[in-house]
Image (spheres, rainbow, N blue to C red):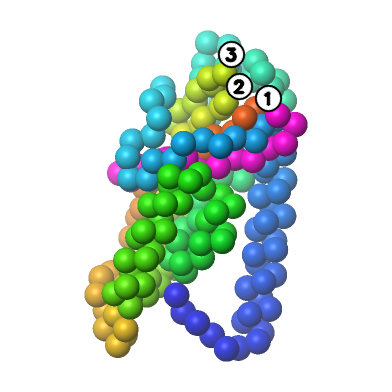
């Protein structure tokens, strides 16, 4: 994480975080649910159908099962929130921001993130991550079991990632190279509840 003592930079950072949380708060109200999904970092997501089902609407499709419980489910708004959550989680992981991660990821995912961050700190390394942009966010799987919805989203993004040692030597990555990153993240929520709290429960890289 790059630290700065510039007050203007700190004010800008606070404003950006406040804006992101406003978006996520709205995203959290899209479905009726507050879920405590089980998280599995670096393992395959919970078993789910695959395929591009962004426009699915009938009851015999994965998203159709969710819409049977919540006919007002807004897929476009969900994906907008998922994209924002994806970008915030990536930045929080790079910065070692555990408090932000706690609000967005389930306990098992959080445990994996915390251990990776702790190892990085033990080595006195810093991860400098620049997210160029997220080119794609699409649903690739969904299921609903006993009122809990799980939706897998495939993200394609471009990042610049550099790991540096305590003496600023480059350990991994390249500050001049843009890398395409493709991940499938699974979010879960109790869609029977009037409060919406989508949590990241699983991640899988390609």
How would you rate the neighbour count of disc 3 (Cα within 10 Å): few for under 14, some for 14-19, many for 20 or more? few
Left or right of residue 63, residue 32 in this image: right
Counting from the top left corner in percent of width and height, residue 110 is at: 46, 51
Question: In the rendered image, which residue does mark 1 sit on?
Answer: 192
> Label 2: which residue?
147
Name above or below for residue 127 compared with residue 156: below
Q: Residue lying farthest right? A: 194
Which residue occupies the extreme top position in the image? 60
Question: What is the x, y in percent for residue 61?
Answer: 51, 16
Using the numbered discs, state the Cα–Cα distance from disc 2 to disc 1 in whole angstroms: 6 Å
Q: Is residue 18 left or right of residue 205?
A: right
Read off the magenta span: 192-206
Secondary structure under the numbered disc 3 in the rendered image: loop
Q: Is residue 146 above or below residue 115?
A: above
Q: Residue at x 35, y 55 (%)?
A: 180
Q: Earlier in the sequence, mark 1 or mark 3?
A: 3
Q: Of marks 2 and 3, which one's residue comes earlier in the chain?
A: 3
C-alpha gap between disc 2 and disc 3: 18 Å
Given contact means CB atoms under 8 Å apart, are the residues at marks 2 and 1 in contact? yes
Q: Which residue is mark 3?
A: 58
């Amino acid at each position: 994480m790059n630290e700065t003592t510039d007050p203007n930079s700190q004010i800008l950072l606070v404003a950006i975080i406040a804006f992101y949380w406003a978006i996520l708060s709205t995203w959290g109200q899209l479905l009726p649910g507050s879920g405590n999904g089980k998280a599995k970092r670096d393992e395959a997501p919970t078993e789910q159908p695959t395929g591009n089902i962004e426009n699915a609407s009938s009851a015999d499709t994965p998203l159709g099962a969710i819409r049977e419980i919540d006919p007002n489910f807004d897929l476009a708004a969900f994906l907008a929130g998922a994209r924002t959550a994806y970008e915030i989680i990536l930045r929080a992981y790079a910065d070692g921001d555990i408090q932000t991660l706690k609000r967005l990821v389930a306990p098992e995912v959080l445990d994996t993130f915390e251990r990776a961050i702790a190892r990085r700190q033990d080595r006195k390394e810093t991860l400098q991550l620049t997210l160029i942009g997220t080119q794609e966010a699409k649903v690739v799987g969904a299921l609903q079991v006993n009122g809990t919805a799980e939706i897998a989203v495939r993200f394609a993004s471009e990042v610049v990632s550099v790991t540096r040692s305590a003496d600023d030597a480059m350990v991994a990555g390249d500050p001049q190279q843009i890398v395409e990153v493709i991940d499938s993240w699974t979010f879960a929520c109790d869609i029977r509840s009037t409060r919406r709290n989508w949590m990241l429960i699983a991640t899988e890289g390609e």
